[in-house]
Amino acid sequence: MLALAKPALDIGLSTNRWDAMRAFYVDELGLPYEELLPVGGGVRQHRLGLRGGVLKINDNRSPLGDEPTGYRRLLIADPTVDEPVTRNDPDGLAVTLVPPGHGGVEAVGFEVATSDPEAYRRFATEALGATPIAEHTYQLATTVIIVADAAAAPRAGAMNNVGFRYITVQVRDVVAEHQRLVELGVEEAMAPRKLGEVAMISMVRDPGGNWIEISQRASLTGPLPD
């Protein structure tokens, strides 16, 4: 299982509509704005606090496409609601506010669609180290993963498209974790590389092609390897 450096997973989405997204996520939902990171290629990453994790809103200068993604919905525990309330952000992405504890969600959850729930179960439990808590539902640290059985779900497209595009797991040793995942047969998308002295990241893809960023941040683990 992953040796996590932070218990909460991060959620990444891409958009061309930052101003409208800020109004929705910050002004309406009340997620705290944390920082802006220029990530290159005409992309600025706005980072919002997400119940111990980060919602990474990647604002793209160039127009984005709409290739498929299995990441369908974000769930956020909210003590002000008595039952699940689903709203759509300016790009049409579903965000469901749930009473804390509903469906096991005490902080954050996400829904991922797959055409092969059994393959995803093996991936979630054996590769990520998630724990089954209900049928098609898993918990990885403080994050709940809800698997939607969708026979016609297409393989996920490129990251740089509109929608929820990736999740991030913060680990203590990205090189070791990436190697372990690849040896388990997980699809490699990008070998580990350093982002200055801030972080070292790699990318893998789940059985449906959905993107997962493996990240080792110096602020969490200390100096990065050479």
Image (cartoon, grey):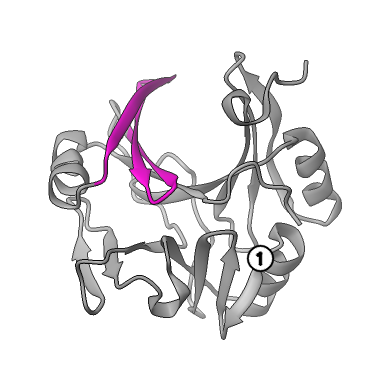
Image quarter in which the C terminus is found = top right
User: Going by the picture, which residue comes out furthest to the front?
Assistant: 79
Residue 192, image quadrant: top right
User: Going by the picture, which residue comes out furthest to the bottom?
Assistant: 135
- Depth order, front residue of 76/204: 76
Residue 130, image quadrant: bottom right
Residue 1 image position (x, y, % from top left):
76, 57
Q: Which residues are magenta?
A: 31-58
Circle 1: residue type: Ala
Identified at 61% across, 14% down, the residue is 197
* Residue 76 located within the stretch drawn in magenta: no
Query: Is residue 150 rendered to the left or right of residue 178?
Result: left
Identified at 37% across, 48% down, the residue is 50
Residue 43, image quadrant: top left
Residue 31 image position (x, y, % from top left):
26, 45
Find disc 1 in the rendering and name its residue. Answer: 130
* Residue 57 located within the stretch drawn in magenta: yes
10 Å crowding of disc 1: few (<14), some (14-19), many (20+): many
Q: Main secondary structure of the magenta part?
A: strand
Identified at 52% across, 67% down, the residue is 145
Which element type, helix, strand or loop, lies under badge 1? Answer: loop
Query: Is residue 212 rendered to the left or right of residue 29?
Result: right
